[in-house]
Image (spheres, grey):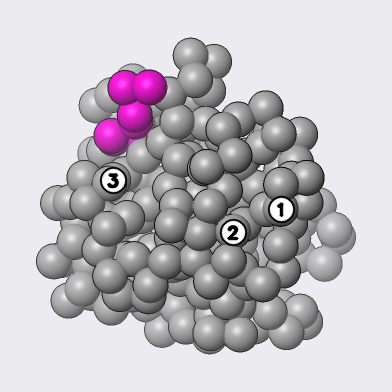
Amino acid sequence: MKMTEFENVKSMTYLEYCDYLQGKYGVGRADYMTRAFNKNNKVSRTSDGLIAHHKAEDKMILLSTKEVAENCPYEWQLKENIVYCDYLEHLLLHVLICKYPSQNKHPLADVGIGGVVDFIVPELNDLYSGWISKQPWRINCHRIVIEDRAVYLEILKMFIAYLQEERGIEDKEILHTSYNEQFGGWSRKQNAKLYAEIDSLWE
């Protein structure tokens, strides 16, 4: 996502942005899961640099996992409820979920925030600090966003404002994360320069 596009979409609600992205990329090529709640590989568009996001993630977390999905309505897995996005668009989707959770969300689900802190930000921190994946599908997805580091920081600025204003969180280290550190091939020390930039976004 380029900065000009980000400026045009940053004020949308979560559902408005889902509709926008479905207009941009189309709905799912297939249902995300079969009736037996197994992943359907036909839904994938990583060859285009895009990942598949469940629109209903404003209601429940981890809908791409069988254990969660099979305890939720199957219609949440239908292709019309799948949104394609690049990595930065996926990050923005989760920030908007934080800001605009569904009124019908699961009472125990803290929607949006885990996707940001536990999954998307750790990987993008590594990417924008120089990590190069060896996985072909990830390479495709990273190639689409590698030049848009400034957009990444702007989306994080939105998220930090949410943390401060809505959650009362002031712990900067919540975003000092690395996806690859757990595998031993990277260290958060290699992300130190980026962390300093992210820290400067806190007011």
Magenta stretch: dominant secondary structure: loop
Q: Is residue 120 above or below residue 96?
A: below
**Secondary structure at numbered mark 1:** loop
**Disc number for residue 14:** 3
The image shows residue 68 at horizontal and vertical percentages of 69, 33
User: Which amino acid does the dot numbered 2 rest on?
Assistant: Asp
Task: Give the mark toward the camera: 2 or 3.
Answer: 2
Query: Can residue 46 be seen here?
Result: yes
Alpha carbon separation for disc pair 1 and 2: 7 Å
Alpha carbon separation for disc pair 1 and 3: 26 Å
Q: Residues within 10 Å of mark 1 (few under 14, many from 20)?
A: some
Residue depicted at 68% across the width and 79% down the height: 137
Residue extent of the magenta highlight: 98-104
**Disc number for residue 31:** 2
- Residue underneath mark 1: 34
Q: Quadrant of the N terminus?
A: bottom left
User: Which amino acid does the dot numbered 1 rest on?
Assistant: Thr
Residue depicted at 71% across the width and 62% down the height: 40
The image shows residue 92 at horizontal and vertical percentages of 36, 55
Who is closer to the viewer here, 59 or 7? 59
The image shows residue 34 at horizontal and vertical percentages of 71, 53
For the view shown, which residue lies furthest in the front direction?
Answer: 35
For the view shown, which residue lies furthest in the top direction?
Answer: 107
